[in-house]
Image (cartoon, rainbow, N blue to C red):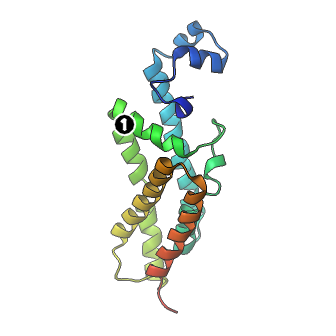
Amino acid sequence: MFVERGYDNTSINDITNACNITKGALYHHFLNKDEIFAGAMQVIIEEIKNWIDEKISTSKNIAELIKDLFDYSDYFSYSKYYDNINSDTYLVLIDSIKKFPEFKTKVADYIFSNIPLIEEKFKEAQLKGEVNKDIDSSSFALHISVLVEGLMFVSAITGTESSLINNGLKIADNLWTMIKTEA
């Protein structure tokens, strides 16, 4: 509901009606709308993080990892709790940072938590001679993370999920072309 309407346009009545519960039942579990919103944002952050973690852990090598991280084709159907995670989700996360500054740390932790894993896969590829050894692995991992998040931001602003998928694949191909060693 917060994703569809935003924080300010979602009332307690909207929430109780959508959940088919009474206000008393809602207030038994939550102090106020802020607490509900915080819980919802935490779930969204966890789901997106899990989606990315899964891609990192199942990728066999750096080429596959780059492709997987920029393959958004399953992103919009990943959610277990919402009809789907969409580009509006990103705007709600940004809104959560403005309304609740403590979310800035949570979102930053989510964004930066995967950098060491990406860096590790990149170093492995450098040792195997698959990618350019002159590229700083920590900078490259940050570069990947920023591109993934930046592409999500562009999709949120433009509202074009199909361009997110197409542009993600192009970015992955270009990145691989830039870093791979010539065989």
* Quadrant of the rendered image containing residue 64: bottom right
- The one nearer the camera, 102 or 127, is 102
Residue at the image point whose x is 58% and y is 45% from the top: 86
Q: Amino acid at mark 1?
A: Ile
Residue at coordinates 56% horizontally, 52% vertically from top-left? Answer: 160
The residue carrying mark 1 is 97
Instruction: Please indicate whether residue 131 sits to the left or right of residue 61 in the image.
Output: left
* Above/below status of 96 relative to 33: below
> Which quarter of the picture shows residue 120?
bottom left
Q: Residue at x 57, y 59 (%)?
A: 163
x 65%, y 54%: residue = 74
In this view, the residue farthest toward the top is 24
Question: Relative to 81, is 161 above or below?
Answer: below
Left/right of residue 27 with respect to residue 111 in the rendered view: right
In this view, 33 is above or below 148: above
- Residue 96 percent coordinates (x, y): 41, 34
Disc 1 packing (10 Å; few <14; some 14–19; many ≥20): some
Q: Quadrant of residue 106?
A: top left
**Farthest bottom residue?**
183
Q: Observer-nearest residue: 57 or 97?
A: 97
Mark yes or no: residue 100 visible: no
Residue 148 visible here: yes
The kind of secondary structure element at disc 1 is helix
Badge count: 1
Note whether 17 is above or below 174 in the view shown. above
Locate residue 112, reporting x and y percent: 39, 53
Q: Position of residue 183 (x, y in %)?
A: 52, 93
Q: Position of residue 134 (x, y in %)?
A: 34, 82
Identify the image quadrant of the N terminus: top right
